[in-house]
Amino acid sequence: MFDKGIYIRRRATLIERMASCAPEGKRGIAIFIGNADAPAQYRDNAYAFRQDSTWLYYFGIDLQGYAAIIDLDSAGQTIYADDVDIDDVIWSGPQPSVRSIAESVGVPCSAPAAAFDEAVRAAAAKGREVHFIPPSRYYNTLRLRNLSLDPSKSSLSLVKAIISMRLVKEDVEIEQMDDACDIGYRMHSLGRSLVKVGAREQDIAGAMDGYTIQKGWGVSFPTILTQHGETLHLHGHTGIVVPGRLMLIDAGAENNMHYPSDFTRTYPTGGKFTKKQRDIYEIVCRANEAAFSLTKPGVAYRDVHLAVEKILLEGLRDLGLVRGNLDDMVDCGICGMFMPHGLGHNIGLDVHDMEDLGENLVGYDPDQKRAPRMGLGSLRMARRLVPGNVISDEPGIYFIPALIGKWKEEGTGRDFVNYAALEDYYDFGGIRLEDDVLVTADGARRLGHERLPIFPDDVEAAMAAD
Ligand code: GLY
Ligand code: MN
């Protein structure tokens, strides 16, 4: 938990930002529901507890079954939860009182859990606005329904106020993210050292995941470790490492304060790139570097994505896989066939930060519209950058036979795409290279104290030394 002053200040800022939404006396209440245990099979056998990120941001308490109300008119704040009883003490051990836990994050009032429902109902009965965020779990959906609130009618003003705060990371958060990236660096280094022909993917992924539990809360998302990188989010690890392929590892660690890292590297399974692999790898590497050098305040990340599309297409054109004018290809969305995802997303308390609050609200400025086309349409962070933003820089090139076949059959991009040459790439796989980047006052900095080897010679040298 951070120092309590941080939570006090954040809640005061939230109240201030909400004040512009309505005159005094009409602002209503903002309610926050922390997560409860989620049973895997039965109640007492639950998934590892992960607190709601918005709750963590404003209240910091990493315990099950908490809720809170902020009165936006009086600035009064109350935390609701039940003190542990003798059964809880027997099975789970003693706990400080709810009152002292509330005080530890600067909330002076606390009350039993049941009083939360009563207070929300009483406010609604008086015609006061009840602001809440979209629930990210069924438990919270049910809690809202039980309060006669429609979970689909979350408060846009509250969501926007929260996004405006969480998008700009504070120094204490950046320290945590550097820490998470350091764990991620070592997690990935361990994984790379185990990529040897004949190894089981499950052993590599298991060692990496285990490391994150040793050093922090665990993985920040299910580890992607695959010799079929052309499938963007393949979570199975049932293969054996075979020679001549590319092993894509997209994985991250969440530290004990719940800040994540999210890195991707792609390795030649035998330790040396073939010429064909290196040619494609160098294009992606160039795009990753270029995106980083373009990242600075005032620049729209949408434009960085478009610059990356151009770099990828130029490299593919040099190899004879596409042909024509680069701007025309970008306009026609040709890059979407090779990189169907966006260049990056926000990272914060969530690895895809705040996407539970609405992907477009988080990732797009009010005057930006999400494009319908493949690739750019999947861009999760398009905004004009400001210092304190943390984003992923993750270009990729993938050869997805089903997608290439579909475009070919439909005649999509027939003026630009060399479908005959692409036939040689059907078993290539995919390459993605991802760093986590902080926007600074005058540019950008990659998070973490060390950077995973990324240039092809460095990757080969590291694999030889592993
Ligand atoms: N690293 C997984 C993702 O960004 O979607
Ligand atoms: Mn990512």
Image: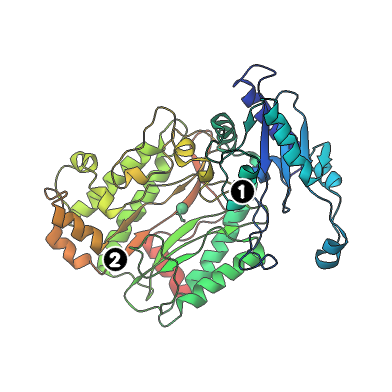
Question: Where 295 falls versus 277 (above or below)?
Answer: above
36 on left or right of 381: right
Colour treatment of the image: rainbow
Describe the element under mark 2 as helix, strand or loop: helix
Residue kind at label 2, given as amino acid type: Gln
Question: Where 405 falls versus 155 (above or below)?
Answer: below
The quarter holding residue 118 reads: top right
Q: Residue furthest right?
A: 86
Q: Which residue is mark 2?
A: 277
Question: Where 383 falls versus 429 (above or below)?
Answer: above
Residue kind at label 1, given as amino acid type: Leu
List x then y, in percent, for residue 372: 30, 40
> For this rendering, which residue is in front, 319 or 58?
58
Q: Which label number is shown at residue 442?
A: none
Q: Which residue is mark 1?
A: 142
Mark 2, residues whose alpha carbon is within 10 Å: few (<14), some, or many (≥20)?
Answer: some
Describe the element under mark 1 as helix, strand or loop: helix
Residue at 53% x, 37% y: name it. 440
84 on left or right of 155: right
Viewer can see residue 264: yes
List x then y, in percent, for residue 353: 53, 45
List x then y, in percent, for residue 155: 57, 32
> For this rendering, which residue is in front, 458 or 195?
195
> For this rendering, which residue is in front, 260 or 282?
260
Mark 1 vs mark 2: in front: 1
List x then y, in percent, for residue 29: 68, 30
Q: Which of the two labelled residues, at mark 1 and mark 2, occupies the earlier sequence position?
A: 1
